[in-house]
Image (tube, rainbow, N blue to C red):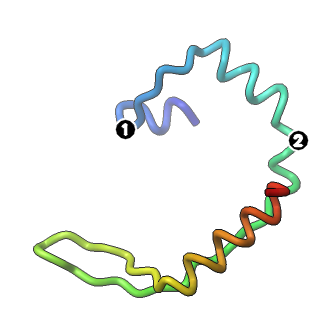
Amino acid sequence: MLKAVGNNVATNISFDEMKSIQKNYGEARKQVEQLQIDGSGAKIDGIWYYIVPEEERVSVQNKLKEHLGL
């Protein structure tokens, strides 16, 4: 994967730290829960933005807080 992303990613994590993360959290990838954030796209001044309504932001924020036990 690192070879595939190559010059498109920058990080200050060492390769040993990356291996440690994979070793310690590799199993977590089997327990991923996905959330879809509803919104709409808009181009403003030539830049594309994903506009998320306030109600949706609050809903996702609450789901994340619940998941994290906050």
**Residue at position x 18%, y 78% from top?**
44
Image position of 9 (left or right of 35): left
Q: Nearer the viewer, residue 63 or 41?
A: 63
Occupied quadrant, residue 1: top right
State the residue position of label 1: 8
**Above/below status of 19 relative to 58:** above
Q: Residue 25: x, y in percent?
A: 82, 35
For the C terminus, give its image quadrant: bottom right
Q: Residue 66: x, y in percent?
A: 81, 65
Q: Nearer the viewer, residue 10 or 52?
A: 52
Q: Residue 57: x, y in percent?
A: 55, 76
State the residue position of label 2: 27
What type is the residue that disc 1 sits on?
Asn
Occupied quadrant, residue 21: top right
**Residue at position x 45%, y 80% from top?**
52
**Residue at position x 82%, y 26% from top?**
23
Q: Residue 5: x, y in percent?
A: 46, 38
**Above/below status of 6 relative to 52:** above
Q: Residue furthest front?
A: 70
What type is the residue that disc 2 sits on?
Glu
- Mark 2 neighbour density, 10 Å: few (under 14) some (14–19) many (20 or more): few
* Secondary structure of residue under mark 1: helix
